[in-house]
Amino acid sequence: MTYLITGASGFIGSHLAQHLLRNGHSVINVDNFDSFYDYKIKIRNTLESLQQSSHFSFSEKDIDINTLVNSTRSERYHLYYQDIRDRTGLKTVFENHSVDMVIHLAALAGVRPSIDRPLEYEEVNIRGTMNLWELCRDFKIQKFICASSSSVYGNNEKIPFSETDSVDQPISPYAATKKSVETLGHVYHHLYAIDMIQLRFFTVYGPRQRPDLAIHKFTKMISGQQEIPFYGDGTTSRDYTYIDDIIDGILKSIEYLQTHTQVYEILNLGENQVIQLDEMVTTIEEELGIKARKNYLPLQQGDVMKTHANIDKAKAMIGYQPKVNFQNGIKRFVEWFLKN
């Protein structure tokens, strides 16, 4: 099978590409190496995902994007340095390959930055996704997986969050774009018979996590004896989901789409274990053996108080079963961090 993955040089995407390559599939990676964080991190992610496949070997450790693009052209992996807002450029990718399924992970991420740059978030997350659907329609690609987010639930008062809950009150532009993509996805499914699963990810962490996200950021700052920004009184909580469990959920969604038709589904992928902010920091402290220095700050606009996934639907529909609890996940992450 040939999978086109947007954002396959990112955190989740590089892990997914790695698994698919290991299993003998072909991967088309569309990534624009956005400046949201250092592009060299995405280059490293790409190299790590490819070096674990017997078909790729890289001796260079410090290479630029163009060298990486030119070094990864093969029968089973092809990297395109491409922005999803550019439909003409995207069309070339679709023309060059026979794609069996699109897995759309690329997006402008982050709740807080979206408040400062709402129009850019709309342009990338909504228009960019619609470009992909238009090309799926043109090239008769009927299978599509899309990354959504737990942020669509806003400050939902019903706990845990279920896929049937109303998501009509998002509290950030980022969340609103993800909600919009879910709604527009149903339109493309209805009009053009594109089978689709929208996956609501709940705070994914693990090796290769984005450096701006709390677990990675706090681990780096605590290990460097820096003050960490501690928002609120420590009682905000998240359903943290380890990367291996997220990848398992995506792979099971792929299998489901391959064996079913007339599909439009939204699924929560979480750990179903809620961890408060102060407990998260304590767990990192214990793994590092270093006490955190906290800079107490007020809660930020756009941040939700709590996330908690009801994963009953994913369990029943695709056999999703998370295996890595938070304590073990942090242990694995810190081990990775200390080696990198």
Image (spheres, helix red, strand yellow):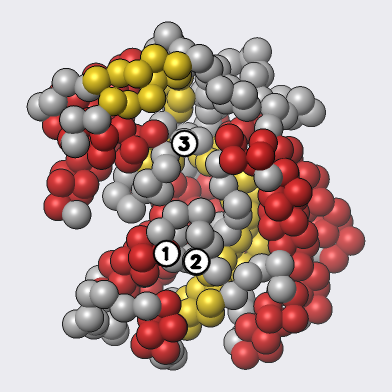
**Where's residue 201, x and y in %?**
53, 41
What residue is pinned by disc 1?
39
Residue shown at the point (45%, 16%) measured from the top left: 297
Of the pair 292 and 138, the residue shown nearer to us: 292
Vertical comparison of 261 with 206: above or below: below
Of the pair 274 and 162, the residue shown nearer to us: 274
Do callouts 1 and 2 mark residues in contact (Cβ within 8 Å)? yes
What residue is pinned by disc 2?
33
SS class, disc 3: loop
**Where's residue 224, x and y in %?**
19, 36
312 left or right, relative to 57: right
**Where's residue 170, x and y in %?**
72, 29
The amino acid type of the residue labelled 3 equals: Thr
Residue 178 in sight in this render: no
What residue is pinned by disc 3?
203
Vertical comparison of 19 with 65: above or below: above
Q: Earlier in the sequence, mark 2 or mark 3?
A: 2
